[in-house]
Image: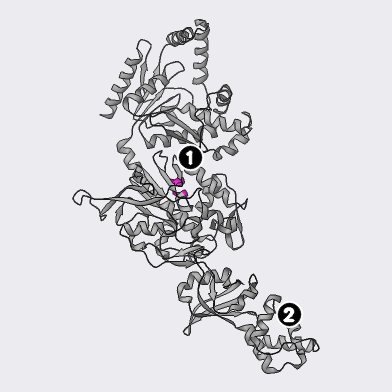
Amino acid sequence: MKTIIIGGGAAGMMTAALLDFNKENVLLEKNERMGKKLYITGKGRCNLTNAAVGEEFMENIVSNKKFFYSAFNGFNNYDMYAFLEEKGLRLKIERGERVFPESDRAQDVIETLERCARAKGAAIYKNAEVKEILFEDLDADREKTLHGRKVKGVRLSDDTVMAADNVVVATGGLSYPTTGSTGDGYRFARAAGHSVSKCYPSLVSFKVKEDFCAQMAGLSLKNVRVRIEKDHNRLYSGFGEMLFTHTGVSGPLILTASALCGIKAENSTLHIDLKPALDENAVDARLRRDFEENPAKSLKNVLRGLLPASMLPVFEKRLGFNCDVNAASVKKEQRDIITALLKNFELVITGLGGYNEAVVTKGGVNVKEIDPKTMESKLVKGLYIIGELLDLDALTGGFNLQIAWSSAAACARAINKKQKEGNKKMTYQIAIDGPAGAGKSTIAKAVAKKMGWIYADTGAMYRAIALYFINNGIASDEEAKINACVDDIGISIAFDEEGKQRVILNGEDVSGKIRTEEVSAMTSKISVYPRVREKLVNLQRELAKAQSLVMDGRDIGTTVLPDATLKVYLTASVEERARRRYLEYVEKGEKADIEEIKADIAERDYRDMHREISPLKQAEDAVLVDSSDMSIDEVIEKLIELFNGKKA
């Protein structure tokens, strides 16, 4: 089963990272690098989620909260926290329960997700723009489903067609268009028959009518209260921090207001209470006291104690009277005007800031047309729409990125379930164990080729992880260091057109670098460590889920693939194995002593059978095949015969 993910942003990378291993999966990113928008979030620090608990978290979801419950319950903020920490990315919680990487580098989040995606076998193509999603009609009599169509692939901008069973649209909305968010996903959704509500910027500044804001640009006001009113109705009220821009106002309070009010804020009035801790009487009392204590000072100088310096010229102008007079000469009527302006500094909101500054897009694909448990379209089978594309948004503080993570996880779970169901019907495994020199690799490769399957070279996987330790200066006896960095190692397996295995180490094809003596020596030493074996056993199991294969070793049937379709214990007498190796040396023109070879094989057998971890032994349900008196072709035919009998 092949899945194509359109978009290498937060939601797209997360989907690829959570999908089960599958070398057929593809992630297409139209930019030259992954996570462009993620890179600038949190001013480059990446506020990746929020640590608010349960309902407290959900209170920050603005649109279609009910739709989001299922995805959030399936993969919540603490699941995301644990996921990244398990992958080696240390996190921290700051004011407002905002979660950041300890490094304060958004790039570290991107690299972690991309590494995880590659480790799951996904082929990542950059500068790959999708022009359209391809569909085909379903046979109504055959498919008992509400879906009218299903996806069959995508067409790229260069007209390349890529087939797929599933297509995940994770292109992002319209915010920050310079990062590639140009609304492609909405076009794809409409082409699939989905309705898309009106979209507009959210978590964005307000533009105001008054041009004097430019004089105060950059001024931040803390501990103020604002309210927004329109036609005698209150649209928003909040307490906190805001700031002035060249065209209006922004800051945490304003961003929240933009999310809650949206376009309704246009042509409304913004009321700013500069002294929210004091009522009008208390403000007047404060003014009288200041004037009495500083009678000879000018009103302007007295006001400096109440207002930021950059705001003072604007405030004076709005008062409408001379502020150069002595404080002692200020009349009650003037004092009342000052009090009123301190308690109600008004601005007229004319509109929202643009998408170029918006944190997120409000509006999007109608969630009634999406399954909330799986993110699959209710209109097109195999089409998944996730992240910012949905009519689903939240307040600032890491909540919107959690929408991306949770919706991606729901999508990945659904696809994984489909893949597992398909694997049960379609994939088979032959596990070959046995002592050294029994011809396991030769037979395994030949059987795989004859069956048209994959031969999984498990030794190459161990060699790749050994190469990582060598390249990073980690010695074979530094078990603590090895254990600490195992999760940082991304190993995946790909296959070329001839079916040959290629070993990918953290995105690099190292197939040609792992056959050195240095790597061989390191491999034999680090393969005994439990953490190393655990990682590679999991990789081998994931590989076996994705396609039919033949795998050989000493614990494949007992440990790695205990549920393999066929388990074979391939052996031969010590004398026969020694004879075969002796002939190999002779053919190479090398001298050899057959008695020494016998002794070496017997010693190796004893060592392998008495290992503390995963010793060599025949699985209870394995078929014993003694090849002492059999040719290679006879052994191959025997294994195929055994498999066909098991399959039947």
Percent across and percent down for residue 522 are 58, 26
Part of the protein shown in magenta: 13-24
Nearer the observer, 174 or 491: 174
**277 to 437, vertically: above or below:** below
Q: Name the image quarter holding the N terminus.
A: top left
Q: Which residue is mark 2?
A: 304
Residue at numbered disc 1: 119
Q: Secondary structure at mark 2?
A: loop
Task: Identify the residue at horizontal 45%, vertical 50% (top origin).
Answer: 30
Which of 92/4 is in front? Answer: 4
What's the amino acid at mark 1? Ala
* The one of 137 and 88 positioned closer to us in this rendering: 137
Residue 263 pos. (x, y %): 45, 73
| Circle 1 SS class | helix
Q: Quadrant of residue 283?
A: bottom right
Q: Is residue 333 left or right of residue 49?
A: right
Is residue 258 rendered magenta in the image? Answer: no
Residue 128: in sight, yes or no? yes
The colour mode here is one colour
Which is more N-terminal, label 2 or label 1?
1
Q: Residues within 10 Å of mark 2 (few under 14, many from 20)?
A: few
Q: From this viewpoint, which residue is outermost toward the right?
A: 296
The percent coordinates of residue 262 (x first, y second) are 47, 72
| Residue 632 shown left or right of residue 140 in the figure | right
Q: At 35% from the left edge and 12% from the top edge, which residue is drawn?
A: 631
Relative to 511, residue 140 above or below: below
